[in-house]
Image (spheres, rainbow, N blue to C red):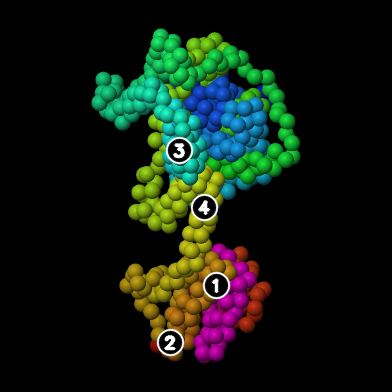
Amino acid sequence: MRLQNLLPNWILQFIQQPRTALPDIQAGLMMAVLVIPQSLGYAALAGLPPIMGLYAAIVPVLIYSWIGASSVSSIGPVAITAIMTASALSDYATGSLQYISLAITLALMVGAILLVGGLIRLGWIMQFVSRGVAAGFISGAAVLIILGQIKHLLGIPLNADSLINLAVSIYHSSKPIHALTAMIGLLALGLLLISRYGERWVWAWLPRQWRSFGNRFFVIVLVVASIWASHRYNLPAYEVNVLQPLPTHLPTASLPSLSPTTLLTLLPSALLIALIAFVSSSTISAQQARLRGETYSANKELGGLGLANIASGIFGGFAVAGGISRTSLNLLVGANSPLASVICALGVLLILLFFGAYLTGLPYVVLASVIIISAIAMIDTKTLAQAWQHDKADAVCFVITFTTAIVFGLNSGLVAGLLASFAAMIYRTHQVHIAVLGRVGNSEHFRNIERYQATTFEGLLLLRIDESLYFGNAQSVRANLLKLSDDSAICDIVLIMTAVNHVDLAAQEMLHDLNQHCQANNQRLHFAEVKGPVMDILKSSQVFANLSGQVFLSTNQAVQTLRPKS
């Protein structure tokens, strides 16, 4: 019994039915080969030695597989955490020992923040990052990733963590484009573009369900071919930057020196990376759980991601997250459980230990092409189009986040997006919808007279307030209520509170003033269908203490009591 409590359910299932593990073992082995180029490239994108990408794809994956919230989400180095790491450390010398130490420290801090968030159950915080902000931020990051790879494609040093810095860098750059590097990069990029966007023609000879896999496996073919060409034609002799020999062992578990000053300096960036890693991971995890009919816990996701990032920092990696492309690939190759991720991590470890030397000579420009192709898929124009059609406020948040991110940098983009999202939320709650109700036929149902054929009653005004009342909308609600009730023939006004979940102090004062105004105009103010928590607030306030009218259990009861008797 004790062993069963320690083991995840998916392991117990495979112990009982070993044959069901075969599809996940096959999927994990294929994933191990396919994620190698991405892991190397994302480490380079973060300004770190490529080997750190492989380190981040081993132990963190094993940790998340054991305790994470999703059965199929693939955790590891992803483009968004890589570029945010590079952005956070842009003031330090890329690739230096200090830079590497700070990247590891950042991963540990991100992990600690996520873990603490899970322990104090902050999973609900994801609700405050709107879809428009998240999509705009990720799309902006994708554009910056693409711009950041220009230096590898052209063989010239450029700073592309924002459009402003890129323009300044280009203006001050005096190094000419390296022709051979540019030729190799454009050739690799062209082949990858043809493979991905000409999939229906290039891979037409494959069964439909395997065409996407053929496209992804082509990356491996291209990497192998470029390594062969690098050795065959001695590309380093022509000043083409290539991958140097990788260590063929795992680093020993260790912690960097953590000074209070360093921690305070990195804290804002760590908080932003933790937030985006959580939003990115939980979005794909929650979606897959919903599609697969599985339970999903945002707090468990926080804990799993937190421990995965701590493990990444301890074992020489950088910040990790759940990636949409990684998870899509995981599902494509047939993964059904975390066993596929376990096999993938062990496969990466074996490749590192026994075949790592064969990766030497891989041109960085080919890795840059792979990263660009992955980043293009991250630009979420679909969400922008949907938002513009159905919710223009979310579309505006997308545009503000995206534009600010690419012009001024990722941190500024996220802050601007969150501020725009909160502004939109406040604007929505400020513009409170108030409906005039009437009876539908002879029923006890009351509906908006502008949408239904409903009967109103002489001298009686039924008003439904469709929003909670607080300081941000109290005065606008008061103005609308006075406008609607400005008729000397109206004797009774009933406020129907079915949609009101809270009434703060400012709103209580507003209702008290409204009641006094009604009394001064020989009108009576009534309430109907007040929710329990709101009733608890109002019954001890001046609103009910001096109420000119009554409080009714239902709208129908109010009408039966107040309408003129025939």
Q: Is residue 431 magenta?
A: no
Q: Is residue 228 above or below residue 2?
A: above
Could you tell me if residue 337 is visible in this image?
no
Mark found first going from the N terminus, 2 or 1: 1
Q: CA distance from mark 3 to mark 2?
A: 68 Å
Left or right, residue 417 beside residue 299? left
- Name the residue carrying label 2: 487
Mark found first going from the N terminus, 1 or 3: 3
> Which mark, residue 416?
4
Q: CA distance from mark 4 to mark 1?
A: 27 Å
Mark found first going from the N terminus, 2 or 4: 4
Q: Nearer the viewer, mark 4 or mark 1?
A: 4
**Contact, mark 2 vs mark 4 (Cβ under 8 Å):** no
Q: Is residue 376 above or below residue 535?
A: above
Q: CA distance from mark 1 to mark 3?
A: 53 Å
Residue numbers of the magenta segment: 498-527
Q: CA distance from mark 2 to mark 4?
A: 45 Å
> Which mark, residue 474?
1
- Name the residue carrying label 3: 170
Three-letter residue code for mark 3? Ile
